[in-house]
Amino acid sequence: MSTQTSKRVRFKLPNTYALIFIFIILAALLTYIIPAGKYDIIQDEVSGRKIVDVESFKFVEQTPVSIKQFLDSIPTGLTKAGNLIFMVFLVGGFFKIVTDTGAIDAGFDAAIRKFESKALLIIPILMFIITFLGAFGVLVSSAIAFIPIGLAIAKKLKLDPICGVAMIYLASYSGFVTSPIGPFNTLIGQSIAGLPPASGAGLRSVVWVFVFIATVFYTFRYAKKVREDNSNSLLDEIRFSDDIKASASGGEFTLSHMLIILVFIGGFILYGVGTKLWKWGTSDLGAVMVAIGVLSGIIGRMSLDDMAKSFLQGCRNMVFGALIIGLARSITVVLEQGNIIHTIIYYMSIPLGKVGPILSSLGMFLSNLIFNFFVPSGSGQGMIVMPIMAPLSDIVGVTRQIAVSAYQYGDGMSNIIIPTSGVLMGVIGLAGIPYSKWLKWVFPLFLIWVGIGAVSLIVATMIGWA
């Protein structure tokens, strides 16, 4: 009698592309189930924006999508999201030129040498630099490339890998989550919601400061304990890869490096001013990145061939996130063709309308926190949820600016804990940190971030932030 060893079948969440394709199929099926409906779109006399007339919903004739419409939705979605997709490629490509000049690495190493005698003072200084790169959207998915720097500093300071990851990954996301100018979350949300780019920067900057301070304090407090006694580490054993060097290795910080960093920072300052004075949009950000990349390459004495190679490599690094934007847009295309997107908004508005604007904004925040588990991409999630949340906010008495922040916070904050985030899993894998240990350490900080986000949404709702 033969015996067979029964193997436990482990559930594995599909790839993000597969999930989005499943969502497109579900959207198509829903056009056969959910009644078609329409709101009238009117122009707001105060802001000049097109908004939903909350009293105008009516059911219309059912228009389920055909097989051809379903298949057409993917190229149509890519086409309609083309401006955002190309912006992502331009930002990624030209930022790669900046990093390949060595200016950023040399700047980090110079800071390490400068404050070497101050030991733990390096932590808040490094995190301050990284949070700005996260806010600009240039060090989010690419944060994994900078993890060795954090690990090298942690090793030199006699800390553990958790501290090394926190200095880079958490600092980056503290800026990305709350960014007033983030091209992959804030600007995408505002573009879909019909808001001026980088509008509402004041309140978002205040939230950014609170999230950053909480992150630095949380990391610094733990680092101090580990430095005093390594047994305070949550890791069973403090071990660094042999490839991680305990000293800076980026070479001398030269005048050209300083000029490149000034060009980089100055370019984003110029874009911030341009959004206010000249009504610049997302395409103008791409133009700014062209100038930053080319000037950086010239100052860094890169040849045209080297700049071209760096640009193409940067674009390759962005393919995953860029195409997600177009595929996610396909979901909205299907819902619009089936005339059910307004019906979904109508049914969602019924319970939210009864609980009031404050709870409605918190409900939007919570739903995005949960949804990010399935689509851990800021740009992809924005393309899925914002076409629904923007008009929904008109109906439940929440401003569109608040709806953007609810999406922005919900997407970014959960990225530091969800195992479906490829960046997170790659980062802790590189550092040799078990997911269970990371989750145990970071979860209290996640709750602090959520608390700050919730309070900011409550305050924003109370003051009618627009």
Image (cartoon, grey):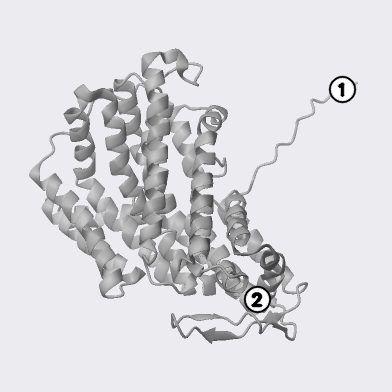
Q: Secondary structure at mark 2?
A: helix
| Image quadrant where residue 343 sits | bottom right
* For residue 386, above or below residue 6: below
Image coordinates of residue 428 in percent, x first then y, are 47, 33
Image coordinates of residue 162 in percent, x first then y, are 43, 28
Give yes or no for contact between labels 1 and 2 (Cβ–Cβ under 8 Å).
no
Could you tell me which quadrant the N terminus lies in? top right
At a point 38% along the width and 43% down the height, the residue shown is 212
* For residue 178, above or below residue 58: above
Residue 182 visible, this angle:
no
- Residue 377 bears which disc, if any? none
Precedes in sequence: disc 1 or disc 2: 1
- Residue 2 bears which disc, if any? 1
Crowd band around label 1 with a 10 angstrom C-alpha radius: few (<14), some (14–19), many (20+): few
Could you tell me which quadrant the C terminus lies in? bottom left
Q: Nearer the viewer, mark 1 or mark 2?
A: 2
The residue beneath circle 2 is: 342
- The alpha-carbon separation of the residues under discs 1 and 2 comes to 59 Å
At a point 43% along the width and 61% down the height, the residue shown is 186
Q: Secondary structure at mark 1?
A: loop
Q: Amino acid at mark 1?
A: Ser
